[in-house]
Amino acid sequence: MKLDIQEEVSIPEGVQISKVGHLIKVNGPKGEVSKKLSGPGIEIKVENNTFQIISKKATKREKKITYSISSHIKNMIKGVTERFVYKLKICPGHFPMNVSMEKEYFTVKNLFGEKTPRKLKISPEVKIKIDGKDVYVEGINKELTSQAAASIETLTKVKDRDRRIFQDGIYIVSKDGKEIKG
């Protein structure tokens, strides 16, 4: 059964949304985020203080795309108003680990006593703050911020060792304010 779907996202004070073709730009107090969003049979409008996603006689696929676009817009609005913050914990077990941010590279030295440091290039839109045993990854773009946090965790992944014994590494503790149970 095909239904008409109209999803509305209210635009808060101090946030402007503009649409040029399929490119949607969201401006706010923390910065600007842009993303290409479109779908077959889906109409996107910006009117007054609402962002409307309309699909006439939507199939299951169009319904999924409509709600996905709505979620992306809500995340973009949240990013330009509040920022996304991911917290990681440095857990050195066997060797003291040195973590630093040099220009655009996140560097981990002396992981498992390795002589060569492990490096990761970080997007300039993502800011990393190192505070003792905590690493804070923050940015206005949710995809870039979460990918940077996940890449840092993957950088220190244990390979060819018993993970029950060698628990050294950097682990995500909090995803945008939500504690992770482990």
Image (spheres, rainbow, N blue to C red):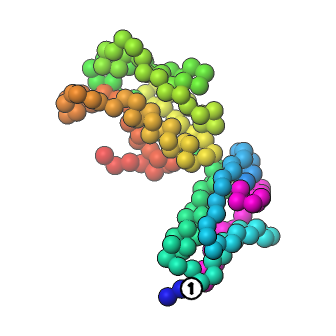
Q: In the picture provided, is 120 more to the left or to the right than 23?
A: left
Relative depth, front residue between 21 and 110: 21
Magenta residues span 3-24
Instruction: Tell me where residue 118 appears, x and y as whole percent.
Output: 42, 21
Q: In the picture provided, is 5 more to the left or to the right than 156?
A: right
Residue labelled with disc 1: 3
Query: Does residue 47 sit above or below 82 in this rendering?
Result: below
Residue 111: quadrant of the picture: top left
Instruction: Tell me where residue 119 appears, x and y as whole percent.
Output: 47, 23
Instruction: Name the element at disc 1.
Output: strand
Query: Does residue 137 sit above or below 101 in this rendering?
Result: below
Relative depth, front residue between 46 and 41: 41
Residue displayed at 38% across by 19% down: 97
Specify whether residue 15 is painted magenta: yes
Q: Residue furthest bottom?
A: 1
Q: Please state which amino acid type lies under the numbered disc 1.
A: Leu
Residue displayed at 51% across by 48% down: 176
Instruction: Tell me where residue 53 appears, x and y as whole percent.
Output: 66, 71
Q: In the picture provided, is 121 more to the left or to the right than 23?
A: left
